[in-house]
Amino acid sequence: MKKIAAIMLSALLTIAFSVTCFAQEGPAQKEVIRSYTWQTEDGFTVVTTIEVNLKSSRSTKNASKTQSYYYGGAHVGTMVLNGEFYYDGSTARATGASKSYSTASGWSYSGGDAKTSGASVSVSGSFDSGSKHCAVDMTLTCSPSGALS
């Protein structure tokens, strides 16, 4: 009887541990590096946040820069610039870039794809609604020490 109980317990533990091994990972955990608000000459308010993925390795960083645009207190659109960087203390380079955006009702976005150049990723375009235009010109840079700006 003890032998059967031991076999059953062993089988139950094997199943329990194998189920937890296949559990899906949650969303990437990020740390806010910097957040600030500024005004454009055209009267738009821009809220900028730079975040880094906490699961980045010692010599690589996955980071994002988000800019949310407002006009007269109303949300216009949001642009997210994602960058992948390699750094080793003496050099840094961008290894990947992507963008995503959303617009409020009545607004549209036009612009190019995100691109890499040296140790930076960038995207440019504009949010538009009738005669109102808000330029989007974003750059995210990684220093040789891994600092983001």
Image: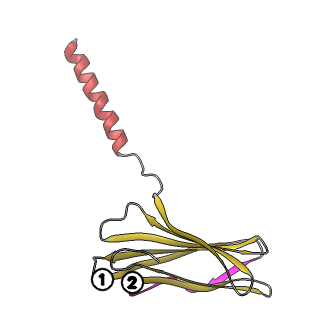
52 lies left or right of 60: right
Judge whether residue 43 is colored magenta: no
Q: As shown in the figure, which amino acid type bears the numbered disc 1?
A: Thr
- Residue nearer the viewer, 9 or 131: 131
Quick one: quadrant of the N terminus?
A: top left
| Three-letter amino acid code at the position of disc 2 | Ala
Count of numbered marks = 2
Q: Mark 2 highlights which residue? A: 119
Does residue 43 lie above or below 30 as drawn? below
Of pointers 1 and 2, the one earlier in the residue sequence: 1
The x and y percentages for residue 111 are: 61, 86
- The structure residue drawn at horizontal position 42% and vertical position 49%, both measured from the top left corner, is 24
User: Looking at the picture, does residue 88 appear above or below residue 11?
Assistant: below
Q: Which residue is mark 1?
A: 91
Q: Specify start and end residues of the magenta stretch as a single range.
A: 107-119
Indicate the secondary structure of the residue bearing disc 2: loop
Residue 10: x %, y % from top left: 25, 27
The way the protein has been coloured in the rendering is secondary structure
